[in-house]
Amino acid sequence: MTNRPFQPELKSSLFGNIQNVSASDSLRELLESLSKEQRRNQELLASLGFVLRSFTNLSRFLELVPIIASQLVGVKGSLLIPFQEDGRLLRDQLQSTVFNNSQELLRELLVYKPALEVGFAFNEKNLKNLDRIVQKNSFQSGIFATSVISRGRQRGRLYVFDSQNSFAWSEIHRRHVQLVADMTGVAIENDLILQEIRRHERVDRQLSIGAEIQAQLLPDHCPIIEGVQLAARCRPAFQVGGDYYDFMPTRPELNGRRRERGRWAFVIGDVMGKGIPAGLLMTMLRGMLRAEVISGLPPDRILHDLNQLALEDLAQSHRFVTLFYSDFDPRSRKLRFANAAHNPPLLWKANSKKVARLDAPGLLIGLQPEAEFVCGETTLDPGDVLLYYTDGVTEAPGITGQRFDEARLINLLDDCASEGLEAQSILEKLFKRLDSFVGIDNHLEDDASMVVLKVNEDITLPKINKIYT
């Protein structure tokens, strides 16, 4: 076997191959490193997305934001400054990673008075001042800041600090931080919507309770009174309304037939306003009025005393009440009445086939301390129909923009009464025409209440033809 000397060109070739292998390994390691970093970043963003989809606690989500942002970029410093809906600093939700001077920075932000003013976050100059405070306390040469935005409104600021002077910010880093900020904006907006839903649910529960209480205060059925038919209905514009009607015996101790033949008070009223405040005031007036009814005083004195009792409470609420009060004696069919600026009831007379307004002078309840009222009186004849109503009926807007108005109601009452309909049928027809006028898909703007009283026809014996044998 012959030994050959080592050739220089072979040595150069081997060295070149070694270099190529080394470069290839380095490139492979770099690609693997990038691939690992991509997978890690994807997992971080996926984790934040999962929390966003399933979170029930905003605080827990916001705690993760600075941690995820700093890890995506590969630095240690990150700070989230969220704002309230009105633009003030959300102090109890300041979140940051631990970095040099982080505690001092948080303390300075907590006592920064301008950030506690309403609308602070909506002023670009204020945000720049905030950026300078963060820059001053971070002691870093590189800082990236972006806004947390939802529905076009500032919801916070997200900062990421460069802990090394040599750190190179890339477009990927900026996109990652912006993506975290955008997800944070969605989380804050979701929480605001959730809070609003909960507020509505609480209000709905309160309204439901209020509507239930009010429904119990209104008569669930009309009383039996000798010689007359009664039908009544209240349709609130909201769940709780300010309309009120009632039937009250002036001598509640009577029972049976004596109660049916005794004097009864019929009242209908309307508190100016809608919703729970109006419903509460009407509930208060109901109690006062029921206490007055048993005094047996005439209607004008009842309204005078009620005005005195309710004046202070109504003045504090800045509301007034319209009220029509009447009492009816079934034996004489005499109706006495007084009006505190309420819509006058409409009386259809069977003998004349005409409709008249039943009115008497009087001011609103709660307007003046010494308001005076006038007592009117009329006798109801067989077949007469009396309609009590609130202004929610005549003021109801139609599809064409016109109001239902009193003239239309008078014509409709004349038609129904002329047909000889029973009280309940008249009420049903009136509401049916009102609903048709307003439109099926539309709602009443105000509470609408109607009470129909019809005097029974006289009982007449059938004629008997004489038979002669």
Image: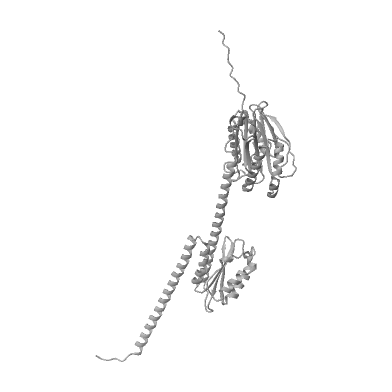
Quadrant holding the C terminus: top right
In the image, is 29 to the left or to the right of 162?
A: left
In the image, is 25 to the left or to the right of 362?
A: left
Find residue 221 and report its horizontal and vertical position in percent.
57, 36
Residue extending furthest toward the left: 1
Find residue 230 and report its horizontal and vertical position in percent.
60, 33
Q: Quadrant of residue 261?
A: top right
Find residue 171 and report its horizontal and vertical position in percent.
52, 71
Residue 397 in sight: no
Nearest the eye: 10 or 439: 439
Task: Reply above or below: 274 against 128.
Answer: above
Residue 37 in sight: yes
Find residue 262 and report its horizontal and vertical position in percent.
63, 31
Q: Quadrant of residue 420?
A: top right
Residue extending furthest toward the top: 469
Quadrant holding the N terminus: bottom left
Nearest the eye: 275 or 88: 275
